[in-house]
Image: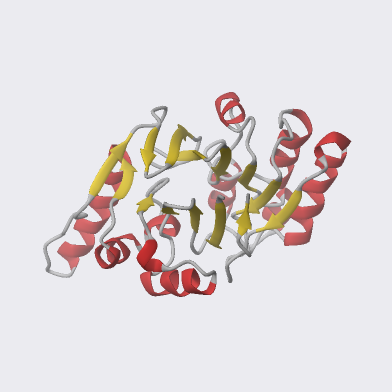
């Protein structure tokens, strides 16, 4: 049995649990420690059973609760070297401003994009994403014959990303914004340009193009993630995905869910 629990997904915090019968991995720590533990308990995940924390990149909505959570839970943290350097620069700057000494993580493990590794009985394969961070990655997880893909925070789907997501039994993928809502919305033009760029965030249209042209259709469930609260709407994202999947009827067999910023998604079990 493999269970996926999205605790939160959006611009104010991202955190997901990938769990096997023996291993529980928290992917990203974008909520406060208190909120993370609260949502874990709401979802039936015992915080004491956490095996490790895995970080995709250093943006605040993916790491803001990391320092406190890692110290409280006393579990290893896995991240790439460049991501750690970027994260620790921020920690050191904040410590200096407070007149304190910066403390690094007590249990730190490094990985490299393109090199798979194990956390308990879960195989983890990180791969590079086009996003404006130090070393952003997506992940696939393999355990007990099941493959799960988790990909958010990318400007577009590269051929390598599409290849990595083949033969997934479950897929969580970004559907960040509706282009027209973004263009007419309240963001400054510089921010709009960043979001729409090839190192920004994936639009509903870009995801729909992937579904209709490149997606192999193997997943039993799909989760649309990292929806913008200002520049998207759940039903717009859903309709866009369903329309694209419906263009290839053999693909339209999925359980389609939308991750929320405000509350955990009901756990998905494979």
Quarter holding residue 201: top right
Between residues 154 and 120, which one lies in front from this camera angle? 120
Tell which of 268 and 102 is nearer to you: 268
- The image quadrant of residue 79 is top left
Q: Find residue 24 and report its horizontal and vertical position in percent.
A: 43, 55
Question: In the visual, does 173 lie left or right of 55?
Answer: right
Q: Is residue 99 above or below residue 216?
A: below
Q: What's the residue at 42%, 42% (across, down)?
A: 121
Front one among 87 and 17 = 17
Residue at (58% x, 66% y) in the render: 261
* Residue 220 as seen in the image, left or right of residue 45: right
Count up the numbered dots: 0
- Residue in view at x 59 percent, y 59 percent: 187
Visible in this render: residue 9?
A: no
Can residue 57 be seen here? The reply is: yes
* Residue 76: percent from left, percent from top: 28, 52
In the displayed structure, would residue 12 be above or below residue 109? below
Q: Is residue 66 left or right of residue 199?
A: left
Q: Position of residue 111 (x, y in %)?
A: 32, 36
Front residue of this view, candidates 101 and 258: 258
Coloring applied to the structure:
secondary structure
- Identify the residue at image location x=82%, y=52%: 239
Residue 251: where, in percent of width, then height?
Answer: 80, 37
């Amino acid at each position: 049995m493999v269970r996926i629990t999205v605790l939160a997904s959006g611009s104010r915090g991202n955190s997901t649990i990938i769990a096997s019968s023996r291993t529980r991995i928290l992917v990203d720590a974008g909520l406060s420690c208190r909120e993370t533990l609260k949502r874990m308990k709401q979802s039936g995940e015992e915080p004491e059973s956490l095996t490790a924390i895995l970080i995709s990149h250093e943006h605040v909505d993916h790491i803001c609760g990391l320092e406190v959570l890692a110290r409280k839970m006393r579990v290893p943290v896995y991240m790439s070297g460049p991501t750690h350097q970027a994260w620790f620069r921020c920690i050191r700057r904040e410590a200096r401003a407070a007149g304190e000494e910066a403390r690094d993580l007590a249990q730190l493990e490094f990985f490299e994009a393109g090199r798979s590794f194990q956390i308990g009985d879960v195989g983890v394969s990180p791969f590079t994403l086009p996003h404006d961070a130090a070393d952003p990655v997506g992940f696939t997880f393999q355990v007990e014959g099941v493959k799960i893909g988790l990909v958010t925070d990318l400007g577009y789907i590269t051929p390598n990303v599409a290849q990595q997501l083949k033969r997934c039994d479950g897929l969580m993928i970004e559907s960040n914004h509706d282009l027209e809502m973004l263009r007419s919305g309240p963001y400054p033009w510089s921010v709009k340009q960043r979001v729409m760029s090839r190192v920004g965030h994936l639009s509903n249209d870009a995801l729909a193009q992937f579904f209709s042209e490149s997606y192999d259709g193997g997943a039993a469930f799909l989760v649309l993630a990292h929806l913008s609260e200002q520049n998207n709407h759940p039903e717009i994202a859903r309709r866009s995905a369903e329309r694209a999947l419906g263009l290839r009827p053999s693909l339209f067999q999925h359980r389609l869910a939308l991750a929320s910023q405000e509350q955990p998604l009901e756990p998905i079990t494979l």
